[in-house]
Amino acid sequence: MIGKQLEYSESLPPSWSVTSVGEIGRYLNGFAFKPTQWGTEGLPIIRIQNLNDRNKPFNYYDGEVPEKYRIRDGDILISWSASLGTYRWNRGDAWLNQHIFKATPKLGELTDEFFYWVMVHGIERIAGNARGSTMKHVTGKEFANSQIALPPLPEQKKIAHILSTVQRAIEAQERIIQTTTELKKVLIHKLITEGLRHEPQKQTEIGPVPESWEIKTVGDYCDILNGYAFKSEDYVTTGGIPNFRVVNISWDGTVSMDDCKFLPESFSVSHEKYLLNEGDILFVMVGATRGKLAQIPASILPALMNQNMWRIVPSREGIDRDYLFHHMRRSVVGLLQEDDDQARGFFKKSDFRDIPLAVPSLEEQIEIRTALGTLETKLGLHAAKNAQLKDLFRTLLHELMTAKTRVHELEIAA
């Protein structure tokens, strides 16, 4: 018997069926909250930023909203604009904002857990064909018409079990990373307020610091350089050098080269002033993700710096780049709290230059950086393990959902 045919896969087993995303589920688009309605009381509003980053603060709304837009733990959410993805909500009751679907299965022969993984796989495929570079978008029709494959119920359950097992391992690593990151924040605060010399403290505009330390500003030590607005038509599909963009900066201060775009190698000469260096500090200063900060590792170089971010470059002696980065990760929080949350808001260079810095001797800066090194190493090891698990997950997701690998060929412990 000839198996079914998917538009994106080879023939399926005879027991599998082919249908569409629209046929297997119901999809509710979120409520169109206006920024003027955002407040600090009521239920949190789930926006795309809150799905992508658990540390992103919520906005709240305490007015009247139809009950259908209330989200509860366990609900399946799909971001179909700006940053495509599928999520299980697990953070309590909240309101659903527009550009996010709440998805529920409507077929009797479809388990809830397998429906979730169908959505995960479907959105990953759709994202590959979506329009836009950093702000991807699909229409409701494109979403609904996307093909999916359905195995029999017993195989659905086994596939869901395997994918959930790997996903739990990923989540365990992410919890370790989150805990270590929080410990690092506490340690940075302690080191910047108390130092390492057991000195008496003095009160300053940024709180207590060791008595011998000076209060300076970012502008006292650094130049702030703009990126370049590279055009999407300049991108190349083979070879080239990375174009480091806002999307490559994570809220946790790390970098990711997922969804990386490349520019011709000749641009490293014609746009030499925008080449990044190891240790450069980049800061997103405009848009919904402004405030993200990252330090460039050698592993991504050579790379060119895109627009919508600044490069913070020490221009005088007396400041250690790693100490500066750790200090700024702490200081920028205050600047974000003072700023509004409009989608295209931006920081002024003058405000950024005025960010105060508590500056010890260069020797003590290096000692503080070294004291943080153990946590940095631990974070790096767990991040590498997490990346390996995610690679395994992506492979299994595609192989199992297209029947290239069958569940009876795999043995994964619970």
Image (cartoon, rainbow, N blue to C red):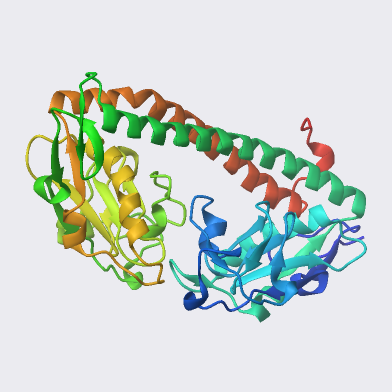
Q: Would residue 244 be seen by someone viewing this image from the given angle? A: no
Vertical order, 341 against 281 (above or below): below
Q: Quadrant of the C terminus?
A: top right
97 relative to 359 in the view: left or right: right
149 relative to 279 in the view: left or right: right
Residue 352 at x, y percent in the picture: 21, 56
5 relative to 180 in the view: left or right: right
Q: Residue furthest top?
A: 198
Q: Quadrant of the N terminus?
A: bottom right
Query: 266 or 300, which is in the foreground?
Result: 300
- Residue drawn 22% across the image and 60% down it: 267
Residue 193 falls in image quadrant: top left
- Residue drawn 56% across the image and 64% down it: 41
136 relative to 88 in the view: left or right: left
Vertical order, 157 against 414 (above or below): below
Q: Residue furthest front?
A: 203
Q: Would residue 189 be seen by someone viewing this image from the given angle? A: yes
Q: Residue furthest left?
A: 316
Query: 328 or 103, which is in the foreground?
Result: 328
Residue 265 falls in image quadrant: bottom left
Total marks drawn? Answer: 0
Residue 189 at x, y percent in the picture: 34, 34
Residue 118 at x, y percent in the picture: 74, 59
Residue 297 falls in image quadrant: top left
Residue 245 at x, y percent in the picture: 35, 58
- Residue drawn 62% across the image and 40% down it: 171
- Residue drawn 26% across the image and 46% down it: 281
